[in-house]
Image: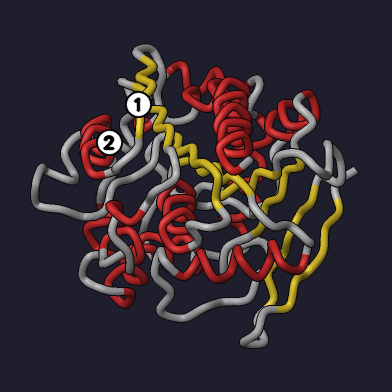
Amino acid sequence: MVIEQNVKLNDGRTLRTYDSGGGDRDGLTVVWHHGSPQTGAPLEPLLTAAAARGIRLVSYGRPSYGGSSPLPGRNVASAADDVAQVADALGVGSFAVMGASGGGPHALACAALLPERVTGVVCLAGIAPYTEDFDWYEGMTSPGGLRAAADGREARELFAATDEFDSSCFTSADFAALDGEWSSLGADAGKAGQAGPDGLIDDDVAFATAWGFDLAEVTAPVLLAQGSLDRVVPPAHAGWTLAALPRAELWVRPEDGHISVLDVCPSAMDWLMARDETRGETQE
């Protein structure tokens, strides 16, 4: 049973949080960082994979998503303090983080800024910090939102007023995933979109401007998973991120796009469990 509750933060905001309530409470806790846009509610394939492994799965809606309070001017780094307070409220000490798409940067923020608590990181189809080291937009089917976001929130709001979803950003494998195993993702993204564009606008501005931390600060082991056919976050982002992180490895999925790459989540959870066990043995 998933326990849903609002966690009140020190600044008076609330975050809508979800706790699987299962797994081994003395074992690994994984905090899931959702994509853009989503509500933060845990997705069925993640709950199933976590339960099979005795993992406690925690997720939450970022500000302006899924009932969570807004945080005007938030950057990617803002997620770390929010997650620390959620973990404290739920009685969680150390934990691993996983993030897909727009959730990837926020997972990395937790690792960079909460080094004593984060045991490992998984980023699936995660966007890289804006850089001129490569053409950041090349290969994106619909980069208009991020291009507008680079000019600030007002420009991104104007873009949102006329923006329409471009289905060509997804591959046939992506659509198959949305019709099958990951149908809950599509339904949740639709629910988040119906609630308004504020969360997505704030995410895009955060991605296209300074994140508030450096990837070199991430000392935990990181697994990057990337579909070679991804048209939303192109493979060059994973390659650049890999080179910038001190302890990272990359799993390339040649036949996957932006959604179908999520099929690697169960194996990625196994990877996190192995790192958590190694960390425990080292501390002993």
Residue 79's x, y, as percent? 51, 65
* Residue at x 31%, y 21% (from the top left corner): 228
Describe residue 36's horizontal placement relative to residue 8 as left or right.
left
Q: Residue furthest front?
A: 284
* Residue at x 70%, y 44% (from the top left corner): 29
Q: Which residue is mark 1?
A: 250
Write down the quadrant of residue 163 in the picture: bottom left
- Which circle's residue, 2 or 1, is located before the other in the chain? 2
Q: Amino acid at mark 2?
A: Leu
Q: Nearer the viewer, residue 246 or 234?
A: 246
Residue 269's x, y, as percent? 61, 29
* Residue at x 55%, y 17% (from the top left corner): 176
Write down the quadrant of residue 56 in the picture: top right
Residue 197's x, y, as percent? 50, 64
Q: Which residue is mark 2?
A: 242
Q: Residue furthest top?
A: 255
Quarter of the image where the C terminus is located:
top right
Secondary structure under the numbered disc 2 in the rendered image:
helix
* Residue at x 82%, y 64% (from the top left corner): 5
Write down the quadrant of residue 246 in the picture: top left
State whether residue 122 is above or below residue 265: below
Given contact means CB atoms under 8 Å apart, are the residues at marks 2 and 1 in contact? yes
Q: Amino acid at mark 1?
A: Leu
Q: Nearer the viewer, residue 96 or 131?
A: 96
